[in-house]
């Protein structure tokens, strides 16, 4: 019988998915210079800054998440009930039974369906806490959803305004 294994790595697609959700802000930012033709220059500058600040925060969070996860890989072996985390060629494994809790740090309670969500609201990260109090942190850039049904009962959510690790 073969093992059922899922491997998560940072992918361009995961990075693009998070940025795509902010496309309205990018459209407004790149269109803001054209507002100078229809309004006075002061309004144009304020409008551009108001749009740029959330994009800048998003860039900082994206960079923070990328640095955290760039050399990391999570392998979940459902058959053996083992999670293996590799970072910089260092490999650590633990059993599903060793997991005390999983905390999802969210940038917004329901960002994907809220049209007023700020660009940095789409970033979430996860903290897996073991029974021996060791913690592992990974972000949406690595894995958008940790689908381990047996661990769902241990999962809690917390909402932060700006979700920097």
Image (tube, grey):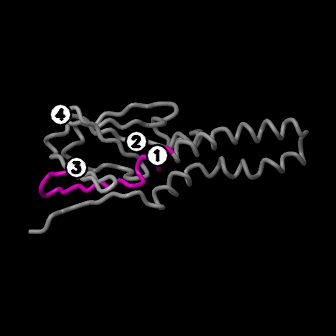
Q: Which residue is mark 1?
A: 65
Q: Residue 136 vs residue 13: left or right?
A: left
**Span highlighted in magenta in the image:** 64-83
Callouts 4 and 2 close, C-beta under 8 Å: no
Distance from disc 4 to disc 1, alpha carbons, whole Å, reads 25 Å
Q: Position of residue 71 (x, y in %)?
A: 38, 55
Dot 2 lies on which element? strand
Of the numbered discs 1 and 3, the one sitting upstream in the chain is 1
Look at the image and tell me in which quarter the C terminus lies. Answer: top left
Callouts 1 and 2 close, C-beta under 8 Å: yes
The crowding category of the residue bearing disc 1, from other C-alpha atoms within 10 Å (few below 14, some 14 to 19, many at least 20), is many
Q: Is residue 58 magenta?
A: no
Return the mark for residue 125: 2
Q: Nearer the viewer, residue 82 or 104?
A: 82
Dot 1 lies on which element? helix
Of the numbered discs 4 and 2, the one sitting upstream in the chain is 2
Of the numbered discs 1 and 2, the one sitting upstream in the chain is 1
Q: Nearer the viewer, residue 9 or 119?
A: 9
Distance from disc 4 to disc 2, alpha carbons, whole Å, reads 20 Å
Q: Nearer the viewer, residue 43 or 95?
A: 95
């Amino acid at each position: 019988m073969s093992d059922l294994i899922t491997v998560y790595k940072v992918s361009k697609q995961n990075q693009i998915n998070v940025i795509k959700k902010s496309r309205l802000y990018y459209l407004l930012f790149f269109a803001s210079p054209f507002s100078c033709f229809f309004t006075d220059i002061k309004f144009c500058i304020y409008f551009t800054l108001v749009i740029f600040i959330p994009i800048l925060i998003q860039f900082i969070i994206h960079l923070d998440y990328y640095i955290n996860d760039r050399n990391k890989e999570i392998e979940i072996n459902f058959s053996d009930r083992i999670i293996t985390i590799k970072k910089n060629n260092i490999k650590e494994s633990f059993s599903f039974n060793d997991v005390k809790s999983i905390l999802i740090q969210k940038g917004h309670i329901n960002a994907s369906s809220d049209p007023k969500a700020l660009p940095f609201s789409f970033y979430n990260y996860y903290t897996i806490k073991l029974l021996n109090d060791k913690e592992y942190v990974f972000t949406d850039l690595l894995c958008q959803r940790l689908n381990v049904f047996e661990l769902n009962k241990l999962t809690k959510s917390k909402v932060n305004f700006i979700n920097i690790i």
